Image (tube, helix red, strand yellow):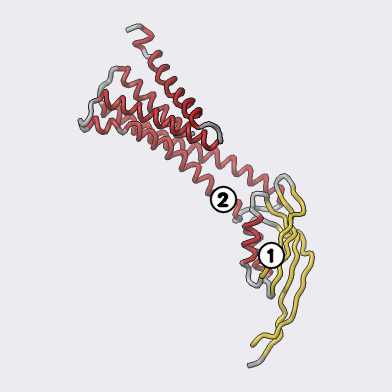
Amino acid sequence: MNAFDGALTMMGFVVGTYISGLRDPRVVLTTGISASFAMGVSGFVGALLTEKAERERKVRELERAMLKSLDGTIIATASKVAILLAAIVDAVAPALTALIISSPFILSCMEFIDYDIAVLASLAISMLLLYALGSYLGKISGGRSWVYGVIMLMAGVAVALLITLSSPGAVIGG
Amino acid sequence: MRRKDVVGITKITLDVMKPREVSIVDLTLALGKVHGVETVEVYVTEVDVKTETLKITLTGWGIATREVEELLEHYAATIRSIDAVSASKRKLLA
């Protein structure tokens, strides 16, 4: 689900920058990459601490039930591995999503494509990623994957609409 | 060459408690690899919210009980009691 956060944040950022009238792909790219690093670190630390707290509590409860320490057992090892894996996944998922979404601006920086096309491509990638994430969730849940995909897509559209409507230009009427 | 009488454990029945997260299949397969063990029988005798009690019977010859103990420890299990032990004598080349 952290990939969902990464996709929506980056999409919001692209839409917001476009509405503000800024037309410099280097600004979008630099801030996009910075944001993806920030999301990566935030995801890693957040997941590490929450998973550690949650899993250590479970191990302690189990120790009370077993009336012995579980240090050095497969339970303790599995818990440590799970904490680390969860933190890595939570770090990589939003960072990677944000990087993928900002990738069209690399082409725009190199003047292969126009800035407006980069914005459109970025938004198209965002929508595709959101739909794919939703479909995957639907597949896991055993429900209709396209329904989940459309719900995710709607979240993306809602973000774009909210930013457009709340932009100073729209509010002031400029 | 001289032959020497050696006594080895042929059967041991243990009452073991383990966390429910630990797979009974994994534990059984691991016990089967212990030195001297030929067959492993595991029955679940009690199920609790977080733990399960097992009746484990190992048969073979020269079962390495210390190894069994260490393995169960590694799988976060506790031996609550040793319910039965059988041993037999074999003549081995010294």
**Marked residue chain, label 2:** A
Q: Which residue is mark 1?
A: B40
> Splitting the image into 4 quarters, where does residue B2 fall?
bottom right
> Splitting the image into 4 quarters, where does residue A40 fall?
top left
Instruction: Assess whether mark 2 and mark 1 are in contact (beta carbons under 8 angstroms).
Output: no
Q: Residue at x 67, y 49 (%)?
A: B20
Q: Which residue is mark 2?
A: A78
Q: Quadrant of the C terminus of chain A?
A: top left
Disc 1 and disc 2 on one polypeptide chain: no
- Find the distance from the CA under tag 1 to the CA under tag 2: 25 Å
Q: Which of the two marks, 1 or 2, is nearer to us in this view?
A: 1
Q: Residue at x 42, y 40 (%)?
A: A92
> Mark 2, residues whose alpha carbon is within 10 Å: few (<14), some, or many (≥20)?
few
* Residue A87: image location, x then y, percent: 48, 41
> Splitting the image into 4 quarters, where does residue B34 fall?
bottom right
Hey, what amino acid is under mark 2?
A: Ala
- Up-down relation of residue B33 to residue A20 (above or below): below
Q: Residue at x 55, y 38 (%)?
A: A50
| Residue A47 disc label | none
The answer to which of A35 and B57 lies nearer the viewer is B57
